[in-house]
Amino acid sequence: MDEQRHETIALLGPAHPLLSDKEHECLSSYVRKCDRRLMFYLCMGYATDSLNKMALSNAKIAGLTSDLNLRGTDINWALGAYYLGCFVFQLPSNLILKKVRPTYWLSGSIFCWSLVTILTAFVTSARELIWCRFVFGAVQAGYLTGSIYYISFWYPRHMVRRRMGFFFASAGLGGICVGPLCSVLTSMDSKWLPWQRIFVVIGAISLLWSLLGPFVLADYPDTASFLSSDEQQLILKIMEHQNTVASTQQVRFVQVKMALLDFKVWLWTAIDFCANAATQVNGMFGPSIIESHGYSPQTAQALTALTNFMAFSGMASIAYIARILRGSSTAIALSNILTICGFLLALCSSNPSVHILALFVFSFASPQPAAHGPAWQMCNLQGNTKPAMAAAMASAFGGLGPLATAFVYRDEDRPQYTRGHLVCLLMTVACFVVTLVLRRVLAKENRRRDLDCGDLEGMSDEQVQDLADNHPHFRYRL
């Protein structure tokens, strides 16, 4: 209870009264309900997203390349088209979320990308495949940033990081399942080709999950029917203090401008860009890297369950690692160092066993900064619109990192993939440097505000709200 009270002080600030024992019990009940209902749906939705994204890399070694007569960089363009689609449509996605009911927006995104995945089974050329993946990225764009924003207005600040950890870890859970599932589908006999079965079955799984969304999700805490009136009043009290009550506020374009001009948001975006480049190596090329060392397609697909288990373990532990190391920035820096070691191992040896070991190492470490970054960002932003815009910026521009990865891992470089490993190594080093710079900037700003608390006299309530995280009483978490 003392630890929870300490976190409450950090959350609400010294000027706000502490929660009573009864309110702590009420808050615990509220969080349990949200975790079991909302977080479970979001996490399983993101797991199916991972299934759909990794379908192409598994279909590639299941005969897709030869059946569609793909040549040169056709498969790289198909992999990269997804990230282009995300980039184009991700920036406005969270602003649309403010106009559309989150329940329908999130479940509708899953429904749409499921249909696109199923239709991908019937493409007949490289051009059709590339367009399908672009559309897949476009309709999927709203889910990641929408979920991040959705979590931020359901949970108090100090609880966001752990939920973000669970959310990003669920992608690894999907990765664990996709390899064995594709291995079984590849081995089956049916009228459809092996790679067609992969797209149809995976698309059908996520489509069924999307249909549950309208019955499971709720739009906002103060309108959720599964919460008691006491729970609604308590969370509204906390969220009003945080300035994150989403149901009663409209899009504030002054906060959109703040997000675009805030260099700290761009530093978080740079962290996402660099981190995502290395994170997606296993998802996009893991099966190909393993197969290039002499394994059959079915064995390579099955073995990716182990590399994805490493990714899941890394992401599932991010909240605890950050807590032990007393901050997300330290956790990001540590995982960067481990990722660098993994890529150096791959670059400095030609032994197949060492290459597989290196894949395990950077599969475990590289996803952690990609998960820590958004969690670190969202617990350091306030306002009703700025967090949404910042999350969209980080996801959109940060999502261009894997676009670079898609084109530097080429079949002509098998089995060493020296060019790809070198590029991702340099991106990880850049992520490490930017993380240290941002930590220093936030710590300096906290010290400045400790010395000068600022003066809010004469400002209207609306003007105070539009200060967002520039509020003089706000302190950044390192």
Image: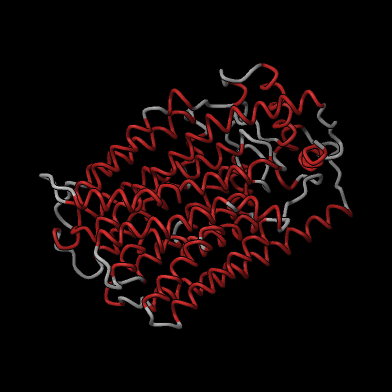
* Whole-percent x, y for residue 360 in the image: 46, 65
In depth, the one of 82 and 353 nearer the eye is 353
- Identify the residue at image location x=45%, y=56%: 399
**Count of numbered marks:** 0
In depth, the one of 98 and 172 nearer the eye is 172
Quadrant where the N terminus sits is top right
Relative to 353, say whether 233 is above or below.
Answer: above
Relative to 302, say whether 464 is above or below.
Answer: above
Quadrant where the C terminus sits is bottom right
Please identify the residue farthest to the right as the structure is shown. 451
* Whole-percent x, y for residue 108 in the image: 38, 33
Relative to 440, say whether 154 is above or below.
Answer: above
* Quadrant of res 57: bottom left
* Quadrant of res 298: bottom left
Please identify the residue farthest to the left as the structure is shown. 191
* Whole-percent x, y for residue 317 in the image: 59, 52
Relative to 19, say whether 2 is above or below.
Answer: below
* Whole-percent x, y for residue 351 in the image: 38, 80
- Identify the residue at image location x=18%, y=64%: 70
Position of 189 compared to 335: left or right? left
In depth, the one of 463 and 413 nearer the eye is 413
Position of 160 compared to 371: left or right? right
Q: How is the image coloured?
A: secondary structure
- Identify the residue at image location x=30%, y=64%: 76
